């Protein structure tokens, strides 16, 4: 290809007004260091941040022509904010990175090197997590391994959304408009030639993270239900197991009656335990079915994934996108 290629960096923004100037500084330094043969742009997506992050982004965009800003009309969620950035990205390759500087911008150089070797997806894999307690590290490790087990699509372990994807992968992702989004699973599903780059995940530059245990569990549920029917299979298998155990128990009762073995203990305790157990199994099974059905209902509305309230740094031909 003649002329320099373009690298787009997509940064979802939420609750990070104080961090943004340093995020922009480090990103700009890391991207400038990639050399003149690779131009860059940074697309910040303000996901209805409750602070004045949008004001900070306006100031950054006014000072740097390579910065473009998308202000969503409200908080649509981290995965949708990434999608908005991918929709607007013009680059031959796109890097997705969070705004909190836990994923170091300096690691982008290693990703670009792999991309230049011909890889189309470069996953950032965390070799070490600084500034996190034992429970946070344990819950994160459990999350990635649970998703690996549940998903029908192989997912890289200890890899978040920090990655580089080629233009061909971006075009494939833009075609996927499902409401319940799990971007790292969508990238894995798309395939293409991929590899990994290890890096040390830093402590958050300031403030507190947005992904607490509840949101992590919600993300895991979205990923599991979007990329696997294994929960339904598990419920079926468990139901068959309970049915077999119930049949064996019934057979044992008949044998005990016929041969007067005297091994049946009278009373209601065992009956109540069995009834409550089966009731719980049925409610859980209905809940799993309801989760899938709820997603079908959501998808059937065909609403747009997000609404844009403001754009900065876009040309006139892009304002309607």
Image (cartoon, grey):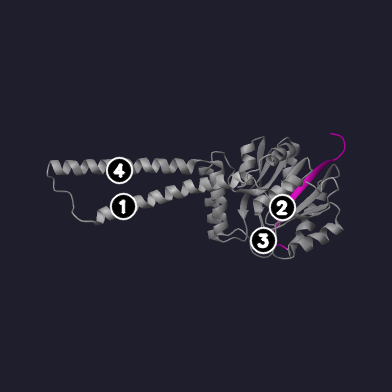
At a point 30% along the width and 43% down the height, the residue shown is 245
Residue 51: % across, % down: 71, 65
Circle 4 residues within 10 Å: few <14, some 14–19, many ≥20? few
Q: Quadrant of the N terminus?
A: top right
Q: How far is the residue under mark 4 from the one under mark 2?
A: 53 Å
The local secondary structure at tag 1 comes to: helix
Residue labelled with disc 1: 275
Q: 317 or 96: which is nearer to us?
A: 317
Magenta span contains residue 227: no
Q: Is residue 228 above or below residue 206?
A: above
Q: Earlier in the sequence, mark 3 or mark 2?
A: 3
Residue labelled with disc 4: 245
Q: How far is the residue under mark 4 from the one under mark 3?
A: 51 Å
The answer to whether 98 appears left or right of 260 in the picture is right
The local secondary structure at tag 4 comes to: helix
Residue mark closest to the camera, 4 vs 3: 4
Is there a contact, CB below 8 Å, between mark 4 and mark 2?
Answer: no
Q: Is residue 173 visible?
A: yes
Is there a contact, CB below 8 Å, between mark 3 and mark 2?
Answer: no
Residue labelled with disc 2: 307
The local secondary structure at tag 2 comes to: loop
Q: Earlier in the sequence, mark 1 or mark 3?
A: 3
Residue mark closest to the camera, 2 vs 1: 2
The local secondary structure at tag 3 comes to: loop
Is there a contact, CB below 8 Å, between mark 4 and mark 1?
Answer: no
Residue labelled with disc 3: 204
Circle 2 residues within 10 Å: few <14, some 14–19, many ≥20? few
Residue found at the very far front of the displayed protein: 301
Q: How far is the residue under mark 1 from the one under mark 3?
A: 49 Å
Q: Which residues are magenta?
A: 1-16
Residue mark closest to the camera, 3 vs 2: 2
């Amino acid at each position: 290809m003649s002329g320099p290629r373009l690298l787009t960096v997509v940064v979802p923004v939420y609750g990070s007004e104080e961090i943004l100037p340093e995020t922009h500084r480090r990103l700009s330094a890391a991207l400038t260091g990639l050399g003149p043969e690779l131009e860059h742009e940074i697309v910040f997506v303000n996901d209805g941040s409750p602070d004045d992050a949008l004001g900070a982004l306006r100031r950054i965009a006014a000072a740097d022509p390579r910065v473009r800003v998308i202000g969503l009309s409200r908080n649509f969620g981290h995965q949708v904010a990434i999608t908005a950035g991918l929709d607007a990205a013009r680059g031959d390759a796109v890097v997705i990175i969070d705004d909190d500087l836990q994923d170091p911008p300096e690691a982008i150089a290693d990703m670009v090197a792999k991309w230049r070797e011909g890889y189309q997806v470069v996953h950032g894999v965390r070799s070490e997590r600084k500034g996190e307690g034992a429970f946070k590290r344990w819950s994160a490790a459990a999350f990635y391994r649970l998703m690996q087990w549940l998903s029908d699509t192989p997912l890289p372990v200890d890899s978040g959304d920090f990655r580089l994807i080629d233009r061909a992968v971006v075009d494939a992702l833009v075609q996927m408009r499902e409401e319940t989004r799990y971007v790292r699973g969508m990238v894995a599903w798309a395939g293409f030639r991929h590899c990994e780059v290890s890096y040390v995940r830093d402590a958050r530059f300031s403030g507190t993270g947005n992904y607490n245990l509840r949101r992590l569990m919600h993300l895991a549920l979205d990923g599991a239900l979007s990329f696997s029917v294994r929960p339904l299979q598990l419920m079926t298998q468990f139901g068959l197991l309970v049915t077999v155990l119930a049949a064996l128990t019934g057979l044992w009762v008949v044998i005990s009656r016929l041969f007067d073995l005297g091994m049946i203990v009278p009373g209601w305790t065992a009956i109540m335990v069995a009834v409550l157990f089966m009731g719980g199994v049925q409610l859980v099974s209905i809940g799993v079915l309801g989760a899938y059905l709820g997603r079908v209902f959501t998808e059937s509305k065909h609403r747009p994934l997000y609404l844009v309230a403001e754009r900065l740094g876009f040309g006139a031909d892009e304002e309607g996108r």
